[in-house]
Image (cartoon, rainbow, N blue to C red):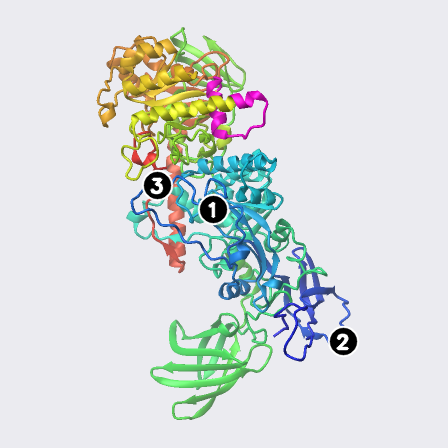
């Protein structure tokens, strides 16, 4: 065992005699990886006092140096894991209150107002070196870890630790403030309700940045230890943990807003949006935790597996290769692995899927060292720590034995370097009989099995201290053999004894290896890995090639203009450069794709004023106002409901916050560009909207543990009055020119006061509708739209006087108490009163048949077909202030159009094409092809899974995914 310091050199000793042990070692005749791409053969590595002091072919070895001949061996720098919780005890989750009340206030004094913001956390106070975990990491080749307390949204700083079990923390702690850590996950140490969503976490992080700046300028009267620590940590490496590829993009978005380039802990899904990942310009830390193959032997259970889950199993091992080939800089981590033992197995799988070995070594050595900013680890340059591993061969080869892992010049034995590798197939001869002996395993764990033909013979094999021991039991006749290897070709010989002590001899000679051609065939077979292609999004019905803007000419089609021209028969419409270029008869356009519209109908794309599809979260309900959050942060471009909506002719939707609180979050107005990313879906220069809500939901009538204010409809009024009173005061302070603390919530309300942000208000009951109109009059703001508005027919005149529009259901009523007075004539009555009226969905299913919902207004109230159709096209566009862009077929507007097989409000009408900005995002003929392709792909993947299972792979049982359906009046929606 090498010398290791147990105490600091300047400490006194009471032993009477103090000696210094020689710590110089020279490792000669080895192949040495100085870095991932600098290799020296037949070289010497010279170390002293835990550091590299010489490396190369002609290193002079000082007298007294212990020399170790490593001929035939390879030395690599030890690996680095820069995202770990090593040595940090996991915090216990706080139990919820027995009376089921929700915690809204913080539990700490002198710190930030939110318990989940903990930048002051320094894990040095509870760090304890974990010998057991250190051994598992050392055995896997790791020499250094970067660790922290994995708890909270802002989690504090980290420690850089050398995994040296034979010294003290005084030597192995390399850095006590290595990085600052963030995530979207709340602290388990607190049950404080806010934030209750991902968009709330993003808003909270933004507010911390603003408050920290305010604090740094000396403007706060109180001392805040959290903000102080956040400011002190701002120059550290900033590491942001994420769990999905979309979250990685969200984290980068927040960082960009404040000029911070986060190093992002990825999810393994990066291949699904590789161009967006590449565009972040971020360094990544990537886990390699691949899912087990699904057990699809039961066809009924196999039906529960989504195509995306099947693809994840198949595609995820290619993630590292995809990242590398796209120039993304990344380190590897054992994070998310249940056992470190799986690390090498998964990495070897990734290499089989195309990940370059040199890049793999870089991702474990030089890259993590560079990210963490430490030049003394991850390499074997002179002056670096003597952290290195000794192997029998290529470190990424499954057959390679890792012998030793030296950390800070201290040897850690993984496998005895003196034990020979005797694995292989042998012909065993004993008692004039031949057997097949197959030896597998590594080091002292090498073991053998014996067969005659296909029949396995009961036997026991062991290999220790160069002695081979075999006990053979054939039909209860025991033969005991003891022997040694007698030549370099692993010829084995020894004595054999039966149970009576009679002595004979045995030998085992290694079989001749297969020919080079068969080796090449085997290698070819190993490389024949099929990875199904990625689509956008990477689920069923995704696009392998993103739609391009086309020049399209519709001929002889019935055009529903949603303009004063009404319906035009046998008309041509030309789409060019993403716009409606011409409308008329006998149009021609060179190079245009012509579509015969005879007997068909062309309309503007349907606009849904109120939807909750395409969202990763819908409510931030932990406070009575969440004006600081925005749905734009949580747009989910992977939601299959986008595709289902465009198959029903919907091209634009306002994605609203839920109705959990009186003042909800800001909305997102999106085009349903299936396959494009979230940013590309959001309207450019989008009008600003926010969700307000009244009624049962905001006062938590149906919540089992809601204790948040307000609890009554009277309280709801006071919330609006209070917040807008504060908004006026905030606005006055801003206008005064005096310093002020940026408050995202107040900034949003001031936008409302200035008419820069419009309100869409969830509403039902006449009395509350009147209340909010009166509050708006008193506080000086306007309401743009009452949505739901099922008692709108009672207050239509008052809404008309204030210029308020209505977005309602066609025929929903009596599904809860506060809609008992709803009637299906509501839309017609409000329209006849002079209001701009739209029919909305608030439901993923209804949003793909809004054409039929519009038709219901013809029956209920006698609306004309044109008036009815306008309620799902130009009217909602007007309510959303986008009618200059969409909502009708007019020259100069966006080419967002839908081709129908029949009259668009007929129950027989089918969408044939949905076009957004001149791109065909839905085509019914292509849809049929996609359905068949999905069947074929599932069949292919199931066959691959069955082959894996038959080959002995570990399997997992299929489970059915829960399908979310967000709308304003489901308990599920209120709790997300």
Judge the density around disc 1: few (<14), some (14-19), many (≥20) Cα neighbours within 10 Å: many
Residue that badge 2 annotates: 63
Front position in the image: 683 or 319:
683
Front position in the image: 596 or 351:
351
Question: Is residue 317 inside the magenta stretch?
Answer: no
Q: Is residue 550 visible?
A: no
Q: CA distance from mark 2 to mark 3?
A: 72 Å
Which image quarter holds the C terminus? top left
Which image quarter holds the N terminus? bottom right
Point 47% across, 57% down: residue: 89
Q: CA distance from mark 3 to mark 1?
A: 18 Å
What span is colored magenta in the figure? 732-756
Q: Is residue 941 visible?
A: yes
Please report whichever mark, 3 or 1, sits nearer to the chain's N-terminal start.
3
Point 47% across, 78% down: residue: 462
Residue that badge 1 annotates: 152
Instruction: Residue 339: give x, y in percent of width and height.
Output: 46, 59
């Amino acid at each position: 065992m090498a010398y290791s310091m147990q105490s600091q050199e300047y400490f006194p000793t009471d032993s009477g005699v103090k000696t210094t042990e020689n710590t110089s070692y020279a490792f000669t005749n080895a192949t040495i990886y100085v870095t991932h791409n600098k290799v020296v053969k037949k070289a010497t590595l010279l170390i002293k006092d835990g550091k590299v002091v010489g490396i190369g072919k002609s290193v002079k070895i000082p007298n007294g140096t212990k020399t170790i001949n490593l001929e035939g061996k390879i030395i690599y720098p030890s690996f680095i894991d820069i995202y770990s919780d090593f040595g940090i005890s996991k915090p216990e989750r706080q139990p919820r209150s027995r009376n089921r009340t929700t915690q809204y206030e913080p539990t700490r004094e002198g710190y930030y107002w939110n318990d989940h913001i903990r930048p002051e956390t320094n894990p040095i106070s509870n760090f304890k070196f974990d010998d057991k975990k250190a051994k598992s990491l050392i055995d896997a080749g790791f020499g250094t870890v970067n660790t922290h307390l994995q708890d909270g949204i802002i989690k504090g700083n980290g420690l850089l630790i050398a995994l040296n079990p034979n010294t003290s923390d005084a030597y192995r702690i390399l850095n006590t403030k290595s990085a600052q850590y963030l995530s979207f996950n709340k602290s388990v140490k607190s049950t404080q309700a806010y934030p209750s969503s991902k968009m709330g976490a993003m808003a909270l992080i933004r507010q911390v940045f603003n408050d920290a700046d305010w604090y740094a300028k000396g403007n706060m009267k109180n001392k805040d230890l959290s903000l102080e620590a956040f400011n002190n940590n701002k120059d550290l490496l900033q590491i942001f943990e994420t769990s999905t590829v979309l979250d990685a993009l969200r984290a980068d978005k927040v960082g960009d807003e404040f000029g911070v380039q986060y190093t992002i802990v990825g999810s393994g899904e990066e291949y699904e949006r590789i161009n967006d990942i590449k565009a972040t310009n971020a360094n990544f830390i990537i886990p390699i935790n691949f899912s087990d193959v699904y057990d699809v032997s039961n066809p009924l259970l196999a039906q529960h597996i989504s195509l995306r889950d099947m693809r994840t199993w198949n595609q995820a091992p290619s993630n590292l290769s995809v990242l590398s080939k796209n120039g993304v800089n990344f380190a590897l981590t054992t994070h998310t692995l249940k056992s470190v033992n799986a690390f090498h197995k998964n990495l070897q799988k990734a290499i089989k899927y195309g990940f370059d070995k040199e890049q793999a070594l870089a991702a474990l050595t030089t890259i993590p060292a560079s990210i963490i900013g430490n030049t003394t680890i991850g390499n074997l340059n002179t002056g670096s720590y003597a952290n290195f591993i000794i192997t029998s061969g290529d470190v990424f080869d499954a057959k390679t034995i890792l012998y030793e892992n030296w950390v800070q010049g201290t040897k850690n034995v993984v496998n005895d370097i003196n034990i020979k590798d005797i694995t292989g197939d042998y012909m065993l001869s004993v008692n004039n009989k031949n057997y097949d002996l197959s030896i597998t395993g590594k080091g002292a764990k090498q073991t053998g099995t014996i067969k005659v033909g296909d029949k396995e013979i009961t036997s026991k094999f062991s290999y220790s201290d160069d002695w081979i021991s075999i006990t053979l039991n054939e039909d209860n006749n025991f033969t005991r053999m003891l022997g040694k290897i007698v030549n370099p070709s692993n010829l084995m010989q020894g004595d054999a004894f039966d149970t009576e002590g009679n002595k004979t001899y045995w030998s085992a000679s290694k079989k001749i290896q297969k020919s080079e051609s068969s080796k090449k065939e085997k290698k070819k077979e190993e490389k024949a890995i099929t990875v199904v292609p990625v689509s956008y999004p990477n689920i069923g019905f995704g696009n392998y090639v993103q739609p391009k803007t086309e020049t399209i000419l519709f001929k002889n089609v019935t055009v529903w203009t949603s303009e004063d021209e009404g319906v035009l028969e046998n008309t041509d419409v030309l789409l060019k450069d993403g716009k409606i270029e011409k409308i008329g008869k006998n149009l021609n356009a060179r190079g245009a794709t012509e579509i015969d519209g005879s007997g068909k109908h062309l309309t503007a794309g349907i606009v849904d004023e109120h939807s909750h599809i395409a969202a990763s979260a819908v409510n931030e309900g932990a406070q009575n106002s969440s004006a600081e959050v925005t749905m734009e942060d949580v747009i989910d471009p992977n939601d299959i409901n986008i595709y289902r909506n465009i198959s029903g002719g919907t091209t634009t939707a306002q994605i609203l916050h839920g109705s959990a609180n009186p003042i909800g979050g800001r909305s997102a107005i999106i085009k349903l560009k299936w396959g494009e990313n979230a940013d590309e879906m959001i309207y450019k220069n989008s009008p600003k909207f926010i969700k307000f809500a009244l009624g049962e939901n905001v006062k938590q009538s149906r919540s089992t543990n809601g204790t948040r204010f307000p609890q009554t409809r009277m309280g709801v009024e006071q919330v609006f009055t209070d917040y807008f009173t504060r908004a006026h005061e905030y606005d006055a302070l801003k206008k005064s020119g005096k310093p002020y603390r940026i408050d995202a919530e107040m900034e949003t309300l001031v936008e409302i006061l200035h008419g820069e942000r419009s309100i869409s208000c969830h509403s039902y009951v006449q009395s509350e509708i009147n209340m909010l109109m009166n509050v708006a009059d008193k506080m000086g703001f306007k309401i743009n739209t009452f949505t739901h508005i099922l008692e709108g027919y009672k207050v239509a005149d008052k809404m008309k006087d204030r210029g308020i529009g209505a977005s309602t259901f066609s025929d929903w009523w009596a599904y809860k108490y506060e809609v008992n007075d709803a009637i299906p004539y509501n839309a017609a009555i409000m329209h006849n009163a002079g209001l701009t009226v739209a029919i909305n969905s608030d439901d993923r299913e209804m949003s793909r048949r809004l054409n039929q919902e519009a038709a219901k207004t013809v029956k209920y109230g006698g609306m004309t077909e044109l008036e009815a159709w306008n309620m799902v096209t130009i009217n909602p566009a007007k309510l959303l202030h986008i009618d200059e862009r969409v909502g009708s077929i007019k020259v100069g507007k966006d080419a967002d159009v839908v081709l129908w097989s029949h009259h668009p409000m007929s129950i027989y009408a089918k969408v044939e094409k949905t076009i957004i900005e001149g791109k065909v995002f839905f085509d019914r003929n292509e849809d049929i092809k996609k359905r068949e392709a999905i069947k074929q792909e599932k069949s292919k993947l199931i066959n691959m899974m069955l082959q894996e299972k038959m080959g002995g792979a570990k399997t997992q049982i299929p489970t059915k995914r829960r399908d979310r359906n967000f709308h304003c009046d489901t308990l599920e929606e209120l709790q997300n």
